């Protein structure tokens, strides 16, 4: 509807407009602030579903779809939390942003007013895309996917991997981007607008992110140690003449004829285990030994880089990812070209892609495919919610989900060629089968096998430097993202405490993560890293995302969620997405979780077999985060007044209106 211009052009901004100047049933607009007459607001509530003009016309009312009412109230609260007489007022001269007031008074009203302030957004769309790609493409793409692929049927594994991506991973990826962008909140306060009783999911996500930060950055510290050690004419893991080498060290790349025995150990393996990790100085998880000061310094430097990359918000980290997200692709291309020109490279590629169709009949292959695509795309860590919350409201998050998830999957596939061309070269040089060379899994594939291959290439120093730089940049992106998930969640939940103290909060968070990493910096720290990776975070994240999908699709309602998407994008998700969100994706998550819990992996690292009690400890750590969900549910039901039925109904009903930007106006969905 048209807004009537004010009749007195020279009236001071600080003066109050006479009530009679606002005609009954009409609105006042001055200096870009829409102040709605109370009767006009009531009429808009009644007619909210009747008026559907064009969304792009800022001079007319917005299309309020599917039961939403655009309400702008001019009933202010005084300092005592009481409601003053309704009147049309011009904004004060010091007003710098266009906001509207809420009828809610007291602390809740102040909270909603703070939410109405302009939220920080990405400087450019490409900053968001690079940040999401950098988060999704991490170290696991380089070492985990190639190993899982050849272990589960080579080229045949691409069939279950693609199916799980289409029906499980990508729909969940899209769902989180849409949730974050529409509600513009982090992983904790988001649930006030969806289903308050599930707010414990947000706290669980923050704890999981802290657990990940306590071990994931230690792997980057290992890579940093390798990077520093690479600045030599001869790489230190090429010979057996170093102080850390033992009598079993055997360099089969030497020009002398060397016989490889059962107890032979390559110099690359001894450098990794005895110089970098120093696991020989630990007896296992019950005797971790002292702290490695070299790794501590490496980790301290990494956290320093992380702090100054994220302390100012996404406008700072959005610039850093231009380097950290693009550099790995340059290096991957260089290493791919170099690997393809090595003798025996074809043996590795053949082993990587040769299909074993019988593997498709095994349940384990489908479980591995589901787990790989899920942990590769990374829903459930609060990162996609946080990053999407800084998008503009009408950003096409549907297109973003398809682009970034496709880039992630293709990167995993290409990384397999980078790894296996080199493994084929190693098999050629050793005169062994590729399966013998590729038996190392996890980080050992990078820090032992690949590092050894690089050391025996021409220009080995150059390739070692760029390779470990690539690992660092891959890890930094994921660290930025994981911590941003916690930061956004806490700052949105407690804006009155931390909104103006972001730098201080980030510093405290970094210190907590560093102190939490001390156990992984010990001589037995590698054992702690593997325990956390397998038990402490995996099952917990699967459980969290399962409950998140159920809460959105079944409690908030799939129809309401699709209406939210239509509000942003102008179109409603099709039946395929609806079926995935309601049934297929939750079943996908339940399938992976039950398979993992029914058949937990038997952990072994180097020559150390994990005792049974460590499995119990791992599950306890993982459960500690998930327990936030039922604990908050009980707490919520206790503090909510009324009968049990009333408490449940109130707890599953959104308690806070979602602010819907409309042109220059912000409208509350109630």
Image: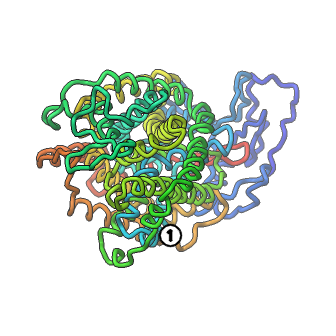
- Residue 328 figure quarter: top right
When the figure is inspected, residue 183 is found, relative to residue 424, above or below; the finding is above
Q: Which residue is more in the foreground, 106 or 296?
A: 296
- Residue 265 figure quarter: top left
- Residue 479 figure quarter: top left
Q: Mark 1 points at which residue?
A: 578
When the figure is inspected, residue 168 is found, relative to residue 474, above or below; the finding is below
The residue that appears at 77% across and 53% down in the rendered structure is 60
Q: Where is residue 615 in the image (x, y as percent from the top left)?
A: 17, 48
Q: Where is residue 656 in the image (x, y as percent from the top left)?
A: 48, 46
The residue that appears at 37% across and 67% down in the rendered structure is 588
Q: Position of residue 568 (x, y in %)?
A: 63, 55
When the figure is inspected, residue 158 is found, relative to residue 20, above or below; the finding is below
Question: What is the residue that sits farthest to the front in this orientation?
Answer: 256
Q: Which residue is more in the foreground, 303 or 560?
A: 303
Q: Which residue is more in the foreground, 336 or 161?
A: 336
């Amino acid at each position: 509807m048209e807004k009537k211009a004010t009749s007195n052009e020279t009236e001071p901004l600080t003066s109050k407009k006479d009530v009679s100047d606002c005609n009954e049933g009409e609105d006042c607009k001055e200096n870009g602030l829409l102040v709605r007459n109370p009767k006009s607001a009531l009429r808009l509530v009644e007619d909210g579903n009747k008026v559907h003009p064009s969304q792009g016309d800022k001079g007319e009312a917005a299309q309020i779809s599917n039961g939403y009412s655009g309400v702008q109230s001019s009933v202010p609260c005084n300092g005592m939390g009481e409601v003053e007489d309704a009147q049309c007022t011009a904004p004060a001269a010091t007003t710098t942003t266009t906001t509207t007031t809420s009828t809610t008074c007291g602390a809740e009203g102040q909270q909603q007013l703070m939410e109405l302030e302009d939220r920080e957004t990405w400087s450019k769309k490409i900053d968001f895309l690079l940040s999401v790609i950098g988060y999704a493409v991490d170290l696991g793409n380089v070492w985990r996917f190639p190993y899982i692929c050849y272990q589960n049927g080579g080229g045949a594994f691409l069939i279950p991997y693609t199916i799980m991506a289409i029906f499980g991973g990508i729909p969940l990826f899209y769902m989180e981007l849409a949730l974050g962008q529409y509600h513009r909140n982090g992983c904790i306060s988001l649930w006030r607008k969806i289903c308050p009783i599930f707010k414990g999911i947000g706290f669980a996500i923050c704890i999981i992110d802290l657990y990940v930060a306590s071990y994931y950055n230690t792997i980057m510290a290992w890579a940093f140690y390798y990077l520093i050690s690479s600045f030599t004419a001869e790489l230190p893991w090429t010979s057996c003449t170093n102080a850390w080498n033992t009598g079993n060290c055997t360099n089969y790349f030497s020009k002398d004829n060397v016989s490889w025995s059962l107890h032979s150990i390559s110099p690359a393996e001894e450098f990794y285990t005895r110089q970098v990790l120093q696991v020989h100085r630990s007896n296992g998880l019950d005797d971790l030994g002292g702290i490695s000061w070299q790794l501590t310094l490496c980790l301290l430097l990494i956290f320093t880089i992380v702090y100054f990359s994220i302390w100012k918000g996404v406008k700072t980290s959005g610039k850093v990812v231009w380097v950290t997200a693009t550099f790995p692709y340059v290096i991957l291309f260089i290493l791919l070209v170099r690997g393809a020109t090595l003798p025996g490279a074809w043996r590795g590629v053949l082993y990587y892609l040769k299909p074993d169709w019988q593997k498709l009949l095994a349940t384990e292959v489908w479980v591995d495919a589901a787990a790989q695509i899920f942990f590769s795309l990374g829903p459930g860590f609060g990162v996609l919610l946080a990053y999407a919350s800084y998008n503009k409201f009408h950003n096409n998050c549907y297109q973003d989900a398809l682009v970034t998830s496709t880039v992630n999957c293709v990167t995993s596939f290409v990384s397999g060629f980078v790894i296996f061309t080199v493994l084929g070269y190693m098999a050629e040089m050793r005169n062994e089968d590729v399966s013998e060379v590729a038996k190392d899994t996890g980080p050992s594939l990078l820090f032992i096998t690949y590092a050894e291959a690089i050391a025996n290439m021409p220009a080995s120093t150059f390739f070692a430097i760029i390779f470990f730089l690539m690992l660092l940049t891959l890890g930094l992106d994921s660290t930025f993202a994981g911590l941003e998930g916690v930061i956004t969640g806490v700052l949105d939940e407690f804006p009155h405490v931390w909104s103006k103290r972001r730098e201080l909060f980030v510093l405290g968070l970094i210190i907590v993560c560093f102190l939490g990493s001390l156990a992984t910096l010990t001589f037995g720290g590698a054992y702690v890293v593997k325990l956390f990776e397998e038990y402490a975070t995996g099952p917990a994240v699967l459980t969290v995302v399962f409950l998140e999908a159920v809460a959105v699709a079944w409690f908030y309602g799939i129809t309401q969620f699709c209406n939210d998407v239509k509000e942003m994008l102008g179109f409603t998700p099709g039946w395929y997405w609806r079926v995935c969100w309601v049934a297929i994706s939750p079943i996908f998550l339940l399938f992976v979780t039950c398979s993992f819990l029914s058949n937990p992996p038997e952990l072994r690292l180097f020559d150390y077999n994990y005792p049974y009690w460590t499995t119990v400890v791992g599950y306890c750590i993982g459960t500690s985060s998930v327990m936030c969900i039922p604990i908050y549910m009980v707490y919520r039901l206790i503090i909510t007044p009324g009968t049990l039925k009333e408490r449940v109904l109130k707890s599953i009903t959104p308690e806070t209106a979602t602010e819907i930007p409309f042109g220059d106006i912000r409208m509350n969905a109630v």
